[in-house]
Image: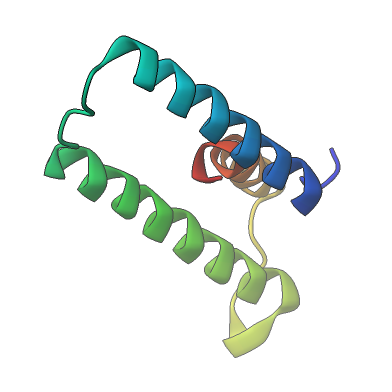
Amino acid sequence: MRPTRPSLLAVVFAVGGLVGGFGLDLAYASLPELSQGSVVTVGVVAILVAFLAWTTHNRLTGQRGARPPEPLVVARYVALARACSPAGA
């Protein structure tokens, strides 16, 4: 599995924004308010993924005497990060 390229995330962001914007413009006369719960949920998930990335990096490089992580756990974190990156864009 290769890392997600920043150019791919930029394309997903641009196309999703355009299609979503035009679609919502056609479906609604005005956009509904975004609930605070969804904003908080996305923020919590972003903080969780960033924390997992930071701690996994420290464990993989052996900083601060951390023991090495289990390979399956690292694979799960990679899958989670790969799935979250287009949603974050």
Q: Is residue 14 left or right of residue 6?
A: left
Q: How many marks?
A: 0
Q: Determine the image quadrant of residue 62.
A: bottom right
Colour scheme = rainbow
Q: Is residue 57 left or right of residue 41?
A: right
- Residues 36 and 41: in front is 36
For the C terminus, the quadrant is top right
- Residue at screen point 67% across, 66% down: 68
- Residue at screen point 23% across, 29% down: 31
The answer to whether 12 is drawn above or below residue 41 in the figure is: above
Q: Position of residue 48 (x, y in %)?
A: 40, 56
The answer to whether 10 is drawn above or below residue 58 in the figure is: above
Q: Is residue 79 left or right of residue 22?
A: right
Q: Determine the image quadrant of residue 81.
A: top right
In the rendered image, is residue 5 in sight? no
- Residue at screen point 32% across, 53% down: 43
Q: Position of residue 80 (x, y in %)?
A: 56, 39
For the N terminus, the quadrant is top right
In the rendered image, is residue 3 in sight? yes
Q: In the image as oriented, which residue stretches furthest toward the bottom?
A: 64
Q: Is residue 53 left or right of residue 35?
A: right
Q: Position of residue 17 (x, y in %)?
A: 53, 34
- Residues 14 and 35: in front is 14
Q: Position of residue 28 (x, y in %)?
A: 26, 16
- Residue at screen point 13% across, 44% down: 36
Q: Determine the image quadrant of residue 41.
A: top left
Q: In the image as oriented, which residue stretches furthest toward the top?
A: 27
